[in-house]
C-alpha cells in the first residue's frame, strides 16, 4: 500500500471492544483511515445509503457515523469483529422483530453485497463455519486427530457411548447467552458419567466426546499468512474457567499441523480463525474446535506476540493481498 491510499478500513464492533481498539491503534500507526461503527447504532448515529442498478458499479453509496464516512465502493477491508444488532426495546415485540429483520437484511445486505474489500471474516462464512459437527468432519478430512464424538438426543445411545469411552465429557454445541433468574451462566466442557444422563437429553441434541488425556492446551491464531501458537498449561479440563490459573508459552507448531489449519481456513474461505487444540502425553495434537472470530487480545498482552499488528497488516493490504 502507498502512503496516499485513502481507502478506509471499516470496523464493525461494539463500543467496548478492547481487542478492536488494539487493531485500530495499529492501523492508525500506519495512517490507514478507519471507519468504526456498530449496527446497534442505526438511526441518528449510523446511516447507510446505497443505490443499485443505476450506475456502472454494482453498489454506490455511503456508510456514515457522526465523525466518519465510508464511500462503499472504495472500502479497502471490513473487519467484522463483535458487532451488536439492534433489539429496539422501546417497540412492541412484533415491531421490534420486524425492525431488527430490516436492519439485518438492509444494513447487513448492503455490506454483504460489497465484493471488492477483504473481509476479516465475512459474517456469512463465519456462520457457516460455526457448526461443531461440520468442524469435526473438516478436521478429520485434513488429517487432524479428532476425539471420538457423539451428537445425539437419544439418552440410551448417549449412555452407551459414555460407558464405552471410559472418560467422557459433554459440551455445548453453541454458546448462547443464558441467564436464568438474571444469573449469567455459561457452558463449559465438563466430565459426564452414564448415570448422569437422563431422559431430558431427548429435548435437544447434545455433544458427548472422549476425553483427551492431555498435558496442555493450545490456542492457535491464524491471521492471513501468520500463525501464532500459544501453549496453555493448567490443571483445568476447561482452561476458560479460571484465567488466573494459566501459564503461557509461545510454541512452534509442527509443519503438518500448521498446514492443516491454514488449509482448514482456505476450505471455508476464512482469512483468520482461533483454533483450540490439545496435546496428549505422547506429544500428539488433537482437534477441539475453531472459533472463526475468537478472542486473542489477552494472549498478545500475556506473550507480546504481534497479533494486532498482523491483523492491521492484513486489513491494510485489503483486496491487494
Image (cartoon, rainbow, N blue to C red):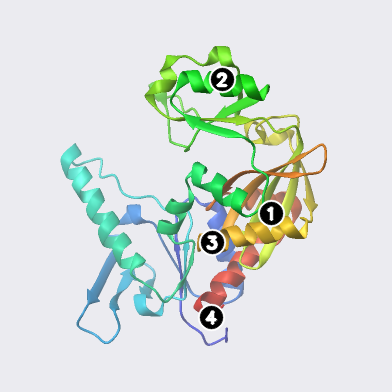
Q: CA distance from mark 2 to mark 1?
A: 43 Å
Q: Residue 202, how many percent across, how many down?
A: 40, 22
| Residue 29 visible in the current orientation | yes
Q: Position of residue 168 (x, y in %)?
A: 63, 25
Q: Count residues near mark 2 (Cα–Cα under 10 Å), then give few for <14, some for 14-19, many for 20+.
A: few
Foreground tag (2 vs 3): 2
Crowd tier of the residue under label 1, counting other residues whose Cα lies within 10 Å: few below 14, some 14–19, many 20 or above: some
Q: Position of residue 251 (x, y in %)?
A: 79, 53
Q: Residues within 10 Å of mark 3 (few under 14, many from 20)?
A: few
In this rendering, the answer to whether 37 lies above or below 245 is: below
Mark earlier in primary sequence (2, 3): 2
- CB within 8 Å, label 2 to label 1: no
Q: CA distance from mark 2 to mark 4?
A: 53 Å
Number of residue marks:
4
| Closer-to-camera residue (267/301) | 267
Upstream in the sequence, badge 2 or badge 1? 2
In the picture of the structure, the residue carrying the numbered disc 4 is 320
Q: Which circle's residue, 1 or 4, is located before the other in the chain?
A: 1
Residue underneath mark 2: 160
Distance of label 1 from label 4 (alpha carbons): 27 Å
Residue receiving disc 1: 300
Q: Say which residue label 3 marks.
A: 267
Residue drawn where x is 48% and y is 56% of the image: 81
Task: Establish if 187 lies above or below 96.
Answer: above
Q: Disc 3 or 1, which lies upstream in sequence? A: 3
Element assignment for label 4: helix
219 relative to 152, above or below: below
Pick whichever of labels 2 and 4 is earlier in the sequence: 2
The residue under the point 56% across, 12% down is 195
Amino acid at each position: 500500500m502507498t502512503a496516499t491510499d485513502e481507502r478506509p478500513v471499516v470496523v464493525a464492533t461494539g463500543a467496548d471492544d478492547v481487542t478492536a481498539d488494539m487493531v485500530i491503534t495499529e492501523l492508525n500507526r500506519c495512517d490507514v483511515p478507519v471507519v468504526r461503527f456498530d449496527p446497534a447504532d442505526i438511526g441518528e448515529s449510523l446511516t447507510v445509503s446505497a443505490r443499485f442498478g443505476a450506475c456502472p458499479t454494482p453498489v454506490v453509496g455511503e456508510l456514515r457515523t457522526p465523525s466518519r464516512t465510508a464511500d462503499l465502493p472504495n472500502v479497502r477491508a471490513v473487519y467484522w469483529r463483535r458487532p451488536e444488532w439492534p433489539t429496539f426495546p422501546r417497540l412492541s415485540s412484533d415491531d421490534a422483530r420486524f425492525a431488527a429483520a430490516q436492519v439485518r437484511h438492509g444494513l447487513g445486505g448492503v455490506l454483504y453485497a460489497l465484493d471488492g474489500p477483504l473481509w476479516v471474516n465475512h459474517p456469512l462464512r463465519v456462520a457457516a463455519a460455526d457448526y461443531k459437527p461440520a468442524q469435526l468432519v473438516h478436521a478429520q478430512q485434513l488429517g487432524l486427530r479428532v476425539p471420538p464424538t457423539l451428537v445425539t438426543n437419544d439418552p440410551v445411545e448417549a449412555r452407551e457411548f459414555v460407558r464405552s469411552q471410559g472418560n467422557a465429557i459433554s459440551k455445548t454445541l453453541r454458546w448462547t447467552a443464558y441467564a436464568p433468574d438474571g444469573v449469567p451462566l455459561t457452558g463449559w466442557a465438563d466430565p459426564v458419567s452414564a448415570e448422569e444422563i437422563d431422559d431430558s437429553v431427548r429435548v435437544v441434541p447434545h455433544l458427548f466426546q472422549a476425553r483427551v488425556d492431555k498435558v496442555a492446551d493450545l490456542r492457535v491464531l491464524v491471521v492471513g499468512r501468520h500463525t501464532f501458537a500459544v501453549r496453555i498449561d493448567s490443571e483445568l479440563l476447561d482452561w476458560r474457567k479460571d484465567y488466573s490459573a494459566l501459564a503461557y508459552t509461545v510454541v512452534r507448531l509442527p509443519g503438518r499441523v500448521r498446514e492443516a489449519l491454514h488449509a482448514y481456513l482456505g476450505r471455508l474461505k476464512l482469512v483468520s480463525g482461533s483454533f483450540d487444540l490439545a496435546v496428549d502425553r505422547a506429544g500428539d495434537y488433537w482437534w477441539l474446535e475453531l472459533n472463526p472470530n475468537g478472542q486473542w487480545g489477552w494472549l498478545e498482552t500475556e506473550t507480546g506476540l504481534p497479533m494486532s499488528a498482523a491483523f492491521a497488516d492484513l486489513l491494510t493490504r485489503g483486496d491487494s493481498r
